[in-house]
């Protein structure tokens, strides 16, 4: 009834060449005619109520054949995908190669599939990177100087802003002088948050600086591990995944520009670039991001790492609380993805 031949193409695409036998294809004729007839208005008949023989004389045969092909492929394409275990990740590109009454329907369908990802020895890579982390990086010590420098930065950020219309001769910078800074006392720290006094503030600040530096170190190590795994992973990257990442990059860029009160078109004019040129500039980043997604996905699959359902639920509730219009299903997918990836990184860190 349906013959198919599946051919693997480059960039993780497959081509399905198919033929639906004439009798089976002809079986869609009356259904197609009825469907088209529902929207046809003919004199003397209510809309959609004209008899078949009248419809045939008013509707071009090619129009009926195209509807038949659409119905046939709409029914058979999901079966082809399922029976041949094709993990399609893009909309199918369909080309009808033979379309005639009382003849087989012949077609070609091209679609991108989830690529095969060959991981390197990721445990060894993680182990090697972690072994190079020094004792000083592992055991971060916060000095009084670190605390004083941070306090100075906070005082500078709270200093009255200078408005200079013309550069003053001999004045190199707009940095406020010590005497222009707000006094660092109990009153000042109490304005910053729930701090009892200067001592309490310094203690809590020291803890925060330590946490921040530890996080920076953790991110640095994670980045080194994942960069090396990505470099050594073999994958035939589908174009659709790169394009999706490019769409995300452009969407974020446009959102940021709009939030700054600028028009994206004006921003592009200022850069003297087209959207296509921006896409070209960010292509390498998009490829890397797409590859990272595949690597993390494969790692979670191989190591059977899944997000904790309770944590996922908590994260989804948090998202929906802050973004009232968010879609629950998409929020759940996002939470599962983020929390699974975190567990993958934690797994790599224990090597």
Image (cartoon, helix red, strand yellow):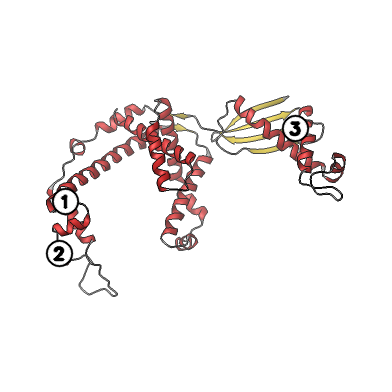
In the image, 195 versus 307, the foreground residue is 195
In the drawing, what numbered circle is on residue 70?
none
In the image, 209 versus 244, the foreground residue is 209
Seen in the picture, residue 284 relative to 119 is either above or below; the reply is: below
> Which one is earlier in the sequence, the residue at label 1 or at label 2?
2
Mark 1 → mark 3, Cα distance in angstroms: 77 Å
Mark 3: few/some/many CA within 10 Å (<14, 14-19, 20+): many
> Which one is earlier in the sequence, the residue at label 3 or at label 2?
3
| Image quadrant where one finds the N terminus | top right
Mark 1 or mark 3, which is nearer to you?
1
Mark 1 or mark 2, which is nearer to you?
1
> Which one is earlier in the sequence, the residue at label 1 or at label 3?
3
- Residue at the image position 43 percent from the left and 27 percent from the top: 301
- Residue under label 3: 105
Secondary structure beneath label 1: helix
- Residue under label 2: 178
- Residue at the image position 32 percent from the left and 27 percent from the top: 124
Instruction: Give percent across and percent down for residue 106.
Output: 73, 32
Instruction: Give percent across and percent down for residue 321.
Output: 40, 46
Mark 2: few/some/many CA within 10 Å (<14, 14-19, 20+): few
Left or right of residue 243, residue 97 in this image: right
- How many numbered marks are there? 3
Secondary structure beneath label 2: helix
In the image, 185 versus 29, the foreground residue is 185
């Amino acid at each position: 009834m349906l013959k198919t031949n599946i051919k693997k193409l480059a960039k993780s695409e497959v081509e399905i060449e198919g033929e639906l036998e004439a009798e089976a294809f002809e079986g869609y004729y009356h259904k197609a005619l009825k469907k088209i007839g529902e929207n046809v208005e003919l004199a003397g008949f209510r809309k959609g109520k004209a008899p078949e023989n009248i419809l045939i004389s008013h509707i071009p045969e090619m129009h009926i054949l195209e509807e038949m092909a659409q119905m046939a492929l709409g029914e058979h394409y999901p079966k082809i995908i399922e029976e041949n275990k094709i993990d399609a990740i893009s909309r199918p590109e369909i080309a009808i190669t033979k379309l005639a009454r009382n003849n087989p329907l012949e077609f070609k369908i091209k679609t991108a599939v989830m690529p095969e990802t060959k991981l390197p020895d990721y445990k060894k890579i993680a182990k090697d990177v972690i072994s190079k982390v020094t004792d000083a990086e592992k055991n971060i010590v916060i000095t009084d100087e670190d605390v004083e420098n941070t306090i100075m930065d906070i005082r500078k950020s709270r200093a009255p802003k200078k408005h200079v219309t013309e550069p003053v001769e001999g004045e190199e910078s707009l940095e406020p002088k010590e005497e222009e800074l707000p006094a660092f006392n109990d009153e000042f720290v109490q304005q910053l948050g729930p701090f009892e006094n200067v001592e309490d503030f310094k203690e809590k600040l020291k803890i925060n600086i330590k946490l921040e530096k530890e996080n920076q170190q953790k991110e640095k190590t994670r980045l080194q591990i994942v960069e090396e795994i990505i470099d050594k992973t073999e994958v035939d990257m589908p174009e659709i995944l790169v394009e999706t990442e490019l769409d995300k990059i452009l969407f974020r860029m446009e959102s940021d520009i709009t939030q700054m009160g600028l028009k994206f078109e004006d921003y592009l004019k200022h850069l003297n670039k087209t959207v296509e040129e921006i896409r070209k500039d960010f292509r390498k980043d998009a490829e890397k991001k797409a590859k990272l997604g595949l690597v993390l996905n494969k790692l979670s699959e191989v190591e059977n790492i899944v997000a904790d359902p309770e944590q996922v639920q908590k994260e989804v509730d948090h998202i929906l609380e802050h973004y009232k219009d968010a879609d629950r299903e998409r929020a759940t997918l996002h939470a599962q993805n983020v929390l699974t990836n975190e567990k993958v990184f934690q797994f790599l860190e224990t090597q």
